[in-house]
Image (tube, rainbow, N blue to C red):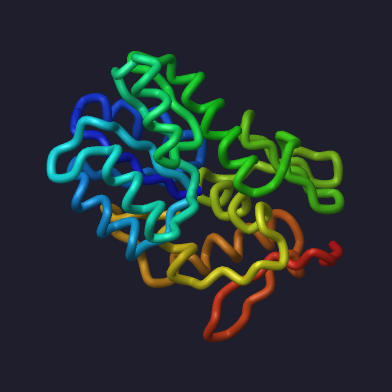
Amino acid sequence: MRLLLIEDDTSLAEGIRTALKPEGYTVDWLADGQQAFHGIKNEVFDLLLLDLGLPGLDGLSLLKKIRAEGKNLPVLILTARDAIADRIAGLDAGADDYLIKPFDITELKARIRALLRRSAGRAQTSLQLGELELNPQNQQVIFQQQPVNLTRREFALLHELLNQPGHVFTRDHLQQLLYGWEEDVESNALEVHIHHLRKKLFPSLIRTLRGIGYVLDKDAQP
């Protein structure tokens, strides 16, 4: 899952990114509201973590603009503004949740998981397809009742594909999901991760659509 963190406090932003990285998330970070608006318009994210007190364009105005653009990604406001009126304004502007600073990082992780489940139309914690089960909370993958050891990026890739079985993902989308803006990536890195997932699980799980991308087949059998 690819998240966009919009926060002008550098130390807090780095702390959040460091805490979320082991969870399998790719977290891009911007500190300016106007830059964030352009980023959201031009790229795909699964969830937005939004501070309200931003330079360039304040968080509430940014939220209203992206909703006016028809962007329906989940938005979790992270702010020190704890007045009831501020919470109401944030939720009415289109936020899906509101977390007051300072917050416990474990609560932030739980709220992110809940919002991602809701956006995918799921109530259950884990993702299942036949004998394959992925649990985002404990970062565990079970196949045929046996644990499967995946790297962080393999887990993130499987999570994205398993969250929407049957959906065709472009190569660019999956590569951005795994590496974000700041990381260098080898030209064949995505193909290597796909190869490893097929080897650790079963070959027919992920199908290549040449010139288009990849799809996790709903009816694939080991």
Image side of residue 83 versus residue 209, left or right:
left
Q: Which x, y percent locates residue 179?
A: 38, 55
Give whichever of 170, 39 is nearer the camera.
39
Total labels drawn: 0
Residue 166 point in image, percent of width and height = 72, 67
214 and 55: which is toward the camera: 55
Q: Would residue 222 be found to the left or right of residue 160 on screen?
A: right
Q: Quadrant of the C terminus?
A: bottom right
Q: Residue most toward the left?
A: 56
Which of the pair 53/48 is nearer the observer? Answer: 53
> Relative to 9, is 77 on the left or the right?
right
In this rendering, the answer to whether 83 lies above or below 47 is: above
Residue 183 percent location from the top left of the image: 30, 54
Vertical order, 122 against 76 (above or below): below
Q: Quadrant of residue 175?
A: bottom left
What residue appears at the point 27 percent right and 38 percent down from the top-left corner? 59
